[in-house]
Amino acid sequence: MTKITLLTFTYTLLHSFSAHSNQMYNLDGLTEIQSASGYLPAIVQQNVNVRTSPNRSSNKLGLLAGGTTVQAEFLLDSNWAKVYFDNQNAYIHKSALIKQQYKADIHYSIKSNESAVFSMSGWHYPHLPGSYFLNYQSNKFGHASFGPLAGSGISEIDTKLFKIKHPDTNAYLITTHISGSRSYYTSYLAIVNKLKLTIFQLPTHTTTDQINYSIEDGRLAFAGKSFHSCCDYDALTANINLDTLSYTATQQTYTLNDNGETKAPAPENIPLTINEIKLAKSTGL
């Protein structure tokens, strides 16, 4: 199958992770899929002025009412978004908008007229819970969706989507979905074949962890920590075979007492939550 990367759906290999420097990735096995560029759906949160230029001193063209849905291009290195208003390009302040996030890995073969798209989409609410979904669509095998991704309470969404480099498997790593007042992380492994979409939910961990993801010998390896207090925590691991989908996952408890750090005698096996969604064929036109 020939692979084409469209202009509005690009992905690049990350070289650094400034947002969460305690997360470590084996970049040799992962390629990050970036957010789509161009015009995307957005919801106007509050009444906002529409202006001729991206600054508050420019002329007003009109007003967009709260609750209106628009197509907006969020400008880089700017507090403004471009919209099409009254038959012309115009600008509104980003703070007035709720943005839809969309990241997609697109495959298309002109010769066989086959297409497949794996995407992560959702709404980012600055002060409310966000809802993100994983979607797969193939014109040959069908479609499936999973979500919303784990998360409750006031959310800060910083979810990353990676394509895993593996010759025989369509696999994706979805990481750092942050939620709750204590900021919990939940990561996912998604694997697609001709029959189904399989989702592994990795152990939930906390933001103060030392988190590691790596791809080695056809396996996804994960290691993280879940703190109960300043010094007591569970060390968590997961190792998933990308070919057979077999896995091992463990938890080992560490505590701090007057004599220093102690740990449980041995790690104990823990189950992972696995969801299997059969691909459904589209019906009708």
Image (cartoon, helix red, strand yellow):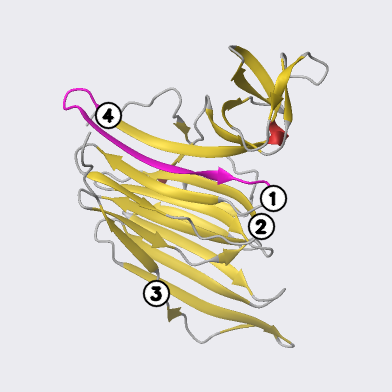
Q: Are marks 2 and 1 in contact (CB under 8 Å)?
A: yes
Q: CA–CA distance between discs 2 and 1?
A: 6 Å
Identity of the residue drawn at 37% across and 46% down: 135
Identity of the residue drawn at 46% across and 25% down: 8
Observer-nearest residue: 1 or 265?
Answer: 1
Foreground: disc 2 or disc 3: 2
Observer-nearest residue: 220 or 36?
Answer: 36
Q: Position of residue 198 (x, y in %)?
A: 31, 57
- From the image, tell me which residue sits under label 3: 271
Mark number displayed over residue 108: 4
- From the image, tell me which residue sits under label 2: 154
- From the image, tell me which residue sits under label 1: 127
Q: CA–CA distance between discs 3 and 4?
A: 37 Å
Badge 3 or badge 1: first in the primary sequence: 1
Mark number displayed over residue 250: none
Q: Quadrant of residue 105?
A: top left
